Amino acid sequence: MAVLPMRRISIYGLKSQRKGVLELLQRRGAVEIIQQQPDSDALSLMDTGAAQSQFAATQATARQALEILDVHCPVKKSPLAMLEGRKPISLQDYQQGLQRVKDSATAAGHIVQLERSREECSAEIIRLQTQLEALEPWLGLDISMRTKGTRSTTAFIGTFPQPMSREQILLGLAQKLPEVKAIEVEVLSALPQQTCVFLLCLSEESPAVETALRSMGFSWPPNPSKKPPSQRKTQLEGWIQEQKGKLASILTEISGYADRRDDLCFLYDYYAMRIEKYQVLSMLRQSRRTFIITGYIPAENAPALEQELQQTFTVFTETEEPGSKEDVPIALKNNGFAAPMEPVLEGYSLPGRGEVDPCTPMACFYYLLFGMMLSDAAYGLIMTIGCAVVLEKFKNMESGLKKSIKMFLYSGISTTFWGILFGSWFGDAVTVISKTFFGTEVTIPALWFVPLNEPMRLLVFSFLLGIIHLFAGLGVQFYQCARAGRWKDAIYDVVFWYLLVGGGIVYLLTMEMTTEMLGLGFTLPEPIGTISAICAGIGAVGVLFTAGRDSKNPGKRFLKGLYGLYNVSGYLSDILSYSRLLALGLATGVIASVFNQMGAMAGGGVVGAIVFTLVFLIGHTLNIGINVLGAYVHTNRLQYVEFFGKFYEGGGRKFNPFAAHTKYYKIREENKP
């Protein structure tokens, strides 16, 4: 376990070499650059906001173009495509890609413009189709809908808001206009929502007729066409076909850019790198001819980077130990066994300055606890084989995801181990299958014991494992204090608690009531109880008089000591919380057994085999999914609350180096130091 020591690095160079230095630092990804205010009138900061906005706009265009191609020219991807990681390209390929950037930006803009034209074309087709649908009820009219009549007659072309027959219209007009007789009505169409009519009357009677029609709900049609509806329909259909042809042409042109997808991905990543570079550029102290870069670098990477910079450019570099008040970032380095714990640790908090990296002791208990909670050998083998195949097939997987897969790989191995100890293979599937379909009972014996038969034994073991876990946390606290030379704190905050809690636990084991309740086959002798009671007493007195040592007031110090002594109840609750190992371990086995029994209810034979297979596959898939999630959540909880609560404060800031944070490609340099 290691928190990498950091050094503050300063790079001084000529402005003519600034671009090359920044590009090298970005490719190496080893320095987190920090902003410092100019300390003289000759130095200033550069405003790159406008350039960043321009780059962001071009990057957004590239993203939109890719999204458009994904819609109209989708690429079939494997469900596991997310595991493939970014495509590695050589520095030579990167340089060649730079030559196509300008052309790719033009292509991206054209694709976006084509998509806008497509949207406008689609909207126009919908508008024309809406007009065509609105024209359908009027197709029986063979004159223009704007016809007002002749010199001696007036025409009314409109609608009623309800279905009406010709007789109903004439009857309604006759009741309202008994003196008017020269009225001709033709119903063009009658729908549940409206009735379209053509009505003709004498011009001198039109005002009275119009008043009567309005009282009956008559209204003029919106946007009537100049041409007869049948001719208007033909015209609209022609326009629709024209727009569809234009739409097909646009889609064909968009599809023609499908082979430019890689260039657009490169364009997106290129501007992502430029945006980050210009963000860093705005943080540099600069004069008319020089620049200064200041940042943090892991101490182990500093010599190689300094050597490469000085060999490639005319620059001066210096590294020094950061000050005690500086906000130094945290970077972790662990072996393959402990590294998978880094994402889990980051989910809580990185170590604060001066704290140790807890990944190694955390990994030892994490895999152990996870496997004990799942505790089925078949489930463990599925996890192990699945994760191993994924790691072998997708070697280019991103670092964070690879660590998570490895975490589940090691947890699967632990699950298999505990499943063999407890004799669980898909629960009791072997016994149920052999008894149901072969008429004989076959079992795979547990190497240790079956938790369903001896739950108290598993509970006691869970408490023992919890005590070891908690004491390991105290051990890490002792190591931190000793490493910092705070030996008094190590004694006050660790040794006294070891004496108090450890002595109390040993003393309980000298009482027959306790051992009988826990189902233990032994009781410690009385002399050991006397010694443990003395140790617990020493620990209690020590905690009482040292827990409040930060207070100068004797009264407050004593009260804080009492409160610190009261925290012994916290250790009790912490130990009891490890009963979740029993609960989740039993839950996995019980649910698996229930599904096995459900599948066997149809009996033997072909039908029974089909039913059992379906229930088995569905049931155990659900069981492994639910209980893997439960084991993950509760294992994290035991680490974050019980284990970290004994020594860990966290609060560290993650090391965020200036690098090529791209989405699609990563630059691979064969000669990278």
Image: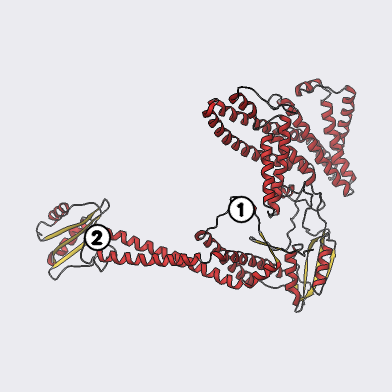
Q: Are marks 2 and 1 in contact (CB under 8 Å)?
A: no
Q: Residue at x 72, y 25 (%)?
A: 456
Between disc 2 and disc 1, whose residue precedes? 1
Q: Where 288 falls versus 557 (above or below)?
A: below
Residue 458 is left or right of residue 72, and the answer is right
The one nearer the camera, 263 or 444, is: 444
Q: What amino acid type should be assigned to the residue bearing mark 2?
A: Trp
Residue 286 appears in the rendering:
no
* Residue 170, image x, y percentages: 14, 55
Residue 583 appears in the rendering:
yes
Q: Residues within 10 Å of mark 1 (few under 14, many from 20)?
A: few
Q: Residue at x 88, y 33 (%)?
A: 538
* Residue 78, image x, y percentages: 58, 52
Q: Secondary structure at mark 1?
A: helix
Q: Residues within 10 Å of mark 2 (few under 14, many from 20)?
A: many
Closest to the camera, between mark 2 and mark 1, is 1
* Residue 367, image x, y percentages: 74, 40
Q: What amino acid type should be assigned to the residue bearing mark 1?
A: Ala
**Looking at the rendering, which quadrant does residue 37 occupy?**
bottom right
- Residue at the disc numbered 2: 138
Residue 394 is left or right of residue 306, and the answer is left
- Residue at the disc numbered 1: 81
| Image quarter of the C terminus | bottom right
Mark sitting on residue 608: none
